[in-house]
Image (cartoon, rainbow, N blue to C red):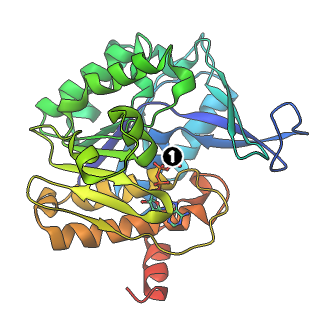
Amino acid sequence: DGLIVSFGEMLIDFVPTVSGVSLAEAPGFLKAPGGAPANVAIAVARIGGKAAFIGKLGDDEFGHMLAGILKENGVSADGIPFDKGARTALAFVTLRADGEREFMFYRNPSADMMLTPDELNLELIRSAKVFHYGSISLIVEPCRSAHLKAMEVAKDAGALLSYDPNLRLPLWPSADEARKQIMSIWDKADVIKVSDVELEFLTGNNNIDDASAMSLWHDNLKLLLVTLGENGCRYYTKNFHGSVDAYNVKAVDTTGAGDSFVGALLCKIVSDHDIIQDEHRLKEVLKFACACGAITTTKKGAIPALPTEKEVLAFLEGEGK
Ligand code: ATP
């Protein structure tokens, strides 16, 4: 089995103990470990794949707690340095009664932003068959340089590069800067996954259609995915494109659905990159990934909701697939 190395941030979301309140109104908060790249690594391990996470944590209670969560889930923490000065990143997040998501980040700077190129575990990166990353690690130095170096080392060692921009607009100095930096590494990736919201943001086109998705195509890309929440996903390759429906579930919290989807996809293609060239096999993999996404929405939180392979197979059997 090939190793999937996921690079970026791991942090703690603090979510209100009651739903539908503003941050100021919340009577209390619960810790919800997250960070998209860390979620992806755990998603891979839950369904039986081999995963490692690379990113910096604070040398504090929260940092060691997060490293412990990775290890408990069978994810290698060998690429995690601990910062003596900066704290583990925190974010207070709420879904207000008006449906708006409200964020408040504690990153001034946080440990994840302090990862330097010299701290990279190059041996671990070179052993990756798939190297996955987002865009939050591009926002500030020195993490940005570490990210660029890690990508280069992985690519030179023959890894497939996988990119899920995971736009978090409030973390960027401006929308233009976010777009520019997200696109600055676009043509390095072999596999790219965007959400409908990101497709709109990156193209400036509010039609979620094939022409808009194809405008994001680049010559070296092997697979482009657009996830559409309860409407499933669309896939694009050099030779074919199409869509896969979502499963009908009672969603209670969609956090982590995209990460669960990506983890499942990478776990299936890591051992056989040729799946991407075979539409029938790719569709089977995407149905599995959509099932993982759907299951993740049925439980609160991201990490606790990521399914095991057994749960996914039972779910698919129940769906008659
Ligand atoms: P996030 O950033 O919240 O992790 P995302 O926007 O990257 O998610 P989504 O499109 O929300 O990604 O979800 C990924 C996949 O999970 C979808 O393609 C779909 O198959 C499944 N999914 C998500 N939400 C639902 C839902 N409400 N019902 C059924 N399936 C869902």
Compared with 120, 248 (above or below) is below
Compared with 192, 107 (above or below) is above
Q: Position of residue 270 (x, y in %)?
A: 22, 55
For residue 315, say whether it is visible.
Answer: yes
Q: For residue 148, what is the image quadrant?
A: top left
The one nearer the camera, 233 or 280, is 233
Give the crowd class for mark 1: few <14, some 14-19, many >=20 residues within 10 Å.
some
Residue drawn 39% across and 20% down?
138
The one nearer the camera, 305 or 282, is 282
Q: Position of residue 40 (x, y in %)?
A: 43, 48
For residue 74, say whether it is visible.
Answer: no
Compared with 43, 132 (above or below) is above
Q: Quadrant of the C terminus?
A: bottom left
Whether the residue carrying mark 1 lies under 8 Å from ligand 1 is answered with: no
260 relative position to 29: left or right: left
Number of labels in the image equals 1
Query: What amino acid type should be assigned to the residue bearing mark 1?
Result: Lys
Q: Quadrant of the N terminus?
A: bottom left
Q: Position of residue 232 (x, y in %)?
A: 41, 64
Residue drawn 32% across and 14% down?
145
Residue drawn 59% across and 60% down?
305
The one nearer the camera, 272 or 27, is 27
Residue drawn 13% across and 61% down?
240
The one nearer the camera, 15 or 86, is 15
16 relative position to 169: left or right: right
Q: Secondary structure at mark 1?
A: helix
Q: For residue 104, what is the image quadrant?
A: top right
Which residue is the site of mark 1? 71
Q: Position of residue 36 (x, y in %)?
A: 48, 41
132 relative position to 66: left or right: left
